[in-house]
C-alpha cells in the first residue's frame, strides 16, 4: 500500500505519519523490527529495494516512512517508481513532503495516484483555536477564553511551538489561565501593553494611538487586545490595592507592575477598566467599529481634566 502525505503544515504531516507508524506497530509489529524511517535526501538504491521489496523479519508485514520524497536522486527515483508497481499488500509505504513541486514528473504522478493521498495545509486562526482546545482537552485540562486568545496570537500558526506549549501547560496545571500561559509563552504585545498604559497615564494621545495601531497593523485581534489591556489594568488595580501582598501573581509580574501602577490613582484605573469592559460588550452586542471604539477610548482616556 502506497500512502502520500504532503502539505505546508509540517507538524500535522509529521504527526499523521507517526500515527500510522504507531498503529502498524500496535497491530503487527510491537518490537518495531520491521519499521523503517528513511530520508530521501540520503536514500540509496539498496535502501529502496530492501525496504520496499524484501519481506520482513519473522513476518511478511513491513512499514516504511520515506521523508522528503522529492529529494530522491534521479537514479533512486527511477528504482522507487519501479518498486511501487511491485509493492505487495503486506507492505505499507508512507511518503511525505512539505509541498508539491510545481513541475510535473513521473514521481509526482505516481504519488498523486497513491492508494491514499492526504494534504495538510496551514490552519486558519479559528481552526488553530479549535486545534489548541482539542489538545488541551486531550490533556484532560480546560483553558479560559483569554488564555486561548493569548497563546494563539503569540505563537501564530507554528503548530510545533503550540504543541510544545500545550504539553508544558497541561503538565503544569489542569486549568489553563492567562496567568499560566504568560509564564510559558512570551508575546511581543506584552511590553507594548505596558508602554500603552504608560502613554495613557502620561496623557500622550499620539503615542498611545501609535502603539495601538501598530498592534492592529501587525494582525492583533481586537478581542485579544482588549483582553490584554483589561488584564493589565486588573493587575495594576490589584497592585494599587495590595502592593502585591498575598497575590497569586508571579513575582516578576508584581515587580514589573509596581512601577507602572505608580503612574495612576486607583479611581483612574477602575474607570479605565470599566471602559474597556464596555467596549468589549459593545463589540459583541453591536456592529460598531472596533478601531473607532478603541480610538475613542484612547482620546478620552488621555484628555487633560480641566
Image (cartoon, rainbow, N blue to C red):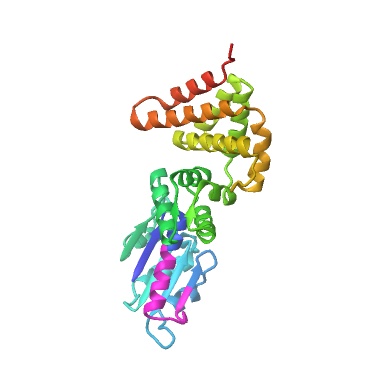
Nearer to the camera, 220 or 225: 225
| Whether residue 189 is situated above or below residue 198 in the rendered picture | below
Q: Give the residue displayed 48% in from the left and 67% down from the top.
A: 75
Q: Give the residue displayed 41% in from the left and 58% down from the top.
A: 137
Nearer to the camera, 258 or 172: 258
Say whether residue 84 is left or right of residue 223.
left
Q: Is residue 49 visible?
A: yes
Q: Position of residue 119 (x, y in %)?
A: 37, 55
Say whether residue 104 is left or right of residue 44.
left
Q: Position of residue 243 (x, y in %)?
A: 65, 39
Q: Give the residue displayed 53% in from the left and 29% down from the top.
A: 270
Tell whether position 221 is magenta: no
- Quadrant position of residue 172: bottom right
| Whether residue 52 is situated above or below residue 207 in the rendered picture | below
Region of the chain picked out in magenta, as a range: 16-36
Q: Is residue 220 visible?
A: no
Nearer to the camera, 46 or 161: 161
Q: Position of residue 80 (x, y in %)?
A: 42, 69
For the C terminus, give its image quadrant: top right
Amino acid at each position: 500500500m502506497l500512502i502520500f502525505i504532503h502539505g505546508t503544515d509540517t507538524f500535522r504531516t509529521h504527526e499523521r505519519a507517526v500515527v500510522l507508524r504507531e498503529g502498524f506497530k500496535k497491530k503487527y509489529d510491537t518490537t518495531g523490527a520491521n519499521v523503517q524511517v528513511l530520508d530521501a535526501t540520503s536514500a540509496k538504491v539498496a535502501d529502496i529495494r530492501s525496504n520496499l521489496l524484501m519481506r520482513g523479519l519473522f513476518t511478511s508485514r513491513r512499514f516504511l516512512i520515506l521523508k522528503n520524497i522529492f529529494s530522491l536522486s534521479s537514479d533512486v527515483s527511477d528504482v522507487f517508481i519501479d518498486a511501487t508497481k511491485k509493492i505487495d499488500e503486506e507492505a505499507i509505504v508512507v511518503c511525505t513532503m512539505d509541498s508539491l513541486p510545481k513541475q510535473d514528473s513521473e514521481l509526482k504522478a505516481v504519488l498523486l495516484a497513491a492508494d491514499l493521498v492526504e494534504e495538510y495545509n496551514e490552519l486558519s486562526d479559528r481552526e488553530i483555536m479549535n486545534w489548541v482546545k482539542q489538545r488541551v482537552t486531550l490533556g484532560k485540562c480546560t483553558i479560559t477564553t483569554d488564555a486561548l486568545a493569548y497563546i494563539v496570537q503569540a505563537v501564530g500558526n507554528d503548530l510545533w511551538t503550540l504543541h510544545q506549549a500545550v504539553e508544558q501547560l497541561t503538565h503544569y496545571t489542569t486549568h489553563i489561565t492567562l496567568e499560566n500561559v504568560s509564564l510559558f509563552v512570551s508575546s511581543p504585545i506584552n511590553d507594548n501593553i505596558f508602554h500603552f498604559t504608560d502613554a495613557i497615564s502620561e496623557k500622550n494621545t499620539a503615542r498611545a494611538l501609535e502603539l495601538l495601531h501598530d498592534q492592529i497593523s501587525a494582525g492583533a485581534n481586537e478581542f485579544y487586545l482588549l483582553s490584554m489591556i483589561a488584564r493589565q489594568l486588573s493587575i495594576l488595580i490589584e497592585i494599587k490595592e495590595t502592593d502585591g501582598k498575598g497575590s497569586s501573581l508571579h513575582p516578576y509580574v508584581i515587580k514589573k507592575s509596581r512601577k507602572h501602577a505608580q503612574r495612576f490613582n486607583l479611581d483612574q484605573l477602575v474607570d479605565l477598566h470599566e471602559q474597556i469592559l464596555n467596549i468589549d460588550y459593545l463589540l459583541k452586542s453591536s456592529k460598531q467599529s472596533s478601531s473607532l471604539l478603541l480610538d475613542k477610548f484612547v482620546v478620552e482616556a488621555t484628555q487633560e481634566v480641566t
